[in-house]
Amino acid sequence: MTKYIFITGGVVSSLGKGIVAASLGRLLRARGFSVTIQKFDPYINVDPGTMSPFQHGEVFVTDDGAETDLDLGHYERFTNTSLHQINNVTSGSVYQTVINKERQGEYLGATVQTIPHITNEIKARIQSCAKKFNPDFLIAEIGGTIGDIESLPFIEAIRQFRAEEGVGNSLSIHVTLLPYLPTSGELKTKPSQHSVYTLRSYGIQPEILVCRTQMEIPKGERDKIALFCSVQKDCVIECKDMDSIYEVPLALEAQNLAGVVLKQLQIEDKKPDISNWEKLVYRIKHPKETLKVAVAGKYTDLNDAYISVVESLKHAALSHECKVEIKWLASEKCLNMNDAHEMLKDVDALVVPGGFGVRGIEGKLNVIRYARENNLPFLGLCLGMQCAVIEYARNVLGLENANSTEFAEGTKYPVIDLMIEQKDVAGYGGTMRLGAYKCHLKEGSKAQKAYGANVVSERHRHRYEFNNEFKTQIEDAGLVICGTSPDGLLAEMVEYPKNDWFVASQFHPEFKSRPEEPHPLFVGLISAAVEQKNKAKQLKIEETAIN
């Protein structure tokens, strides 16, 4: 029988509820339990697919084609599982379902209200997720901050759900903040007390408090929090700020979070196997080398817009016992090749991630050209691949002003064009080519060698594709189409074999990278960068010896 863990947050936003949920999932899985995690977001958007990255950060895509909150990326990476559309629930999707049912007469003329219709639909989503995965534990993270009016239907649904499931089958974890006042030298507990009071006023008494803090919580403050928030002393869990999110599971294990959860649910604790995670964190803290990797995009002012890319680079670097220093490049500022040279002269590798719209495209073409002409290890993702094709068509084939019809509808050389099945699509939300599709790799290609497989499955999010009318010209000029859809009609990957690593994919490999299982394409990029750096060091040693 599935046990349910509901995670809420109080005092301020951005407390890291998603990391706490992901970390707890990891610790439970380390004890041999099966886990799935659901995210409940209170915004009215049906999903984040049409939201600006500046407002919401990255859109994380699942195998079944759901455009979801970036926290699902954390869930997958920490628990090493694949999630689905049912794992991401928004107010918009809930209201849309209820309104559609009302229009279809399913409520038999009843007045449709927040209670019970909206709350019932929320509870149904929890039950559907539990039914799909049949996990030992379902962790549900409620977005927003306690006290926000938008979250109230979810809080009420949880209250009802817990009452219906009965005592011992669920628990509430409240993530809160203990601010530190330097002038008094104190951690202040009052905000957390008020946050718990608000949660209790909605009918939910949390069993466990996870307290975000800059420093160790003194015993006196722990006891005060326990007393005034009506939780047991061992249920006040300290979560100090960490240098790396991957340290959080170990920190929470040291505070016995998973053990306390199991105790509260009257389940016997098991010895966790976290040795691999400990080794991972050790490598993070003790890198042997630092690599500087440039990421050229249009949303560089908000790192969360490319969070899966950044984490994938970290994973790949760790496989070489290295750390990555990200150099963010605002592509719209790279106006010419001199700019590209100045921006890239001190980096070890380049990534051009996905995106939409014409802003910054010419800058992306310039940095890609620099990488190709200077053998700088390069990885292009989705739009990054499309830009690599455009750049090659312009500067190698001589197709002046070759472009994508996304940016220049009347271009003479549309080397990238709208997919046939997209031409009659009306509306934007959830209408792209989304989710996992198979890719057949060319035997002997760098991509095939990196994967160690001939057929792979990767996640997509795009409307435009390589225009096959230019296939022969492109390949005859030396850019290899090294991955295709099973029917051979869609170019999924290209590479420039003359360079150590110049590979680009129409899909998004960053969505499938894991800390313990780095993605092969990112490993290929980092491997090439490490090898080049080692060669440069050796050459310098030899030159010094000669002189």
Image (cartoon, rainbow, N blue to C red):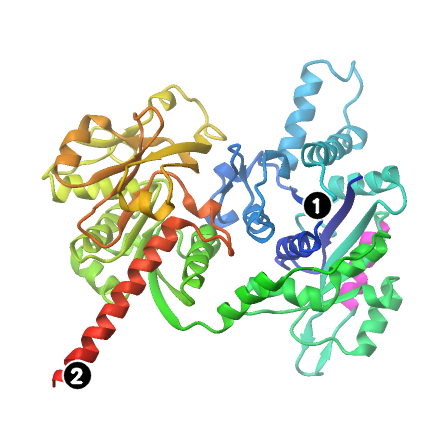
Can you tell which of label 2 and label 1 is closer to the viewer? 2
At 17% from the left and 78% from the top, the residue drawn is 542
Taking 166 as reference, is 505 left or right? left
Q: Is residue 464 magenta?
A: no
User: What amino acid type is highlighted by mark number 1?
Assistant: Ala
Q: Which residues are magenta?
A: 190-201
At 75% from the left and 73% from the top, the residue drawn is 188
Can residue 348 be seen in the rendering of this structure?
Answer: no
User: What amino acid type is highlighted by mark number 2?
Assistant: Thr
User: In the rendered view, would you say 387 is above or below 26?
Assistant: above
Helix, strand or loop for the magenta stretch, by majority: helix
Q: Secondary structure at mark 1?
A: strand
| Marks 2,1: beta carbons within 8 A | no
**Residue pointed to by mark 1:** 140
The image quadrant where one finds the C terminus is bottom left
User: In the rendered view, would you say 467 is above or below 535?
Assistant: above
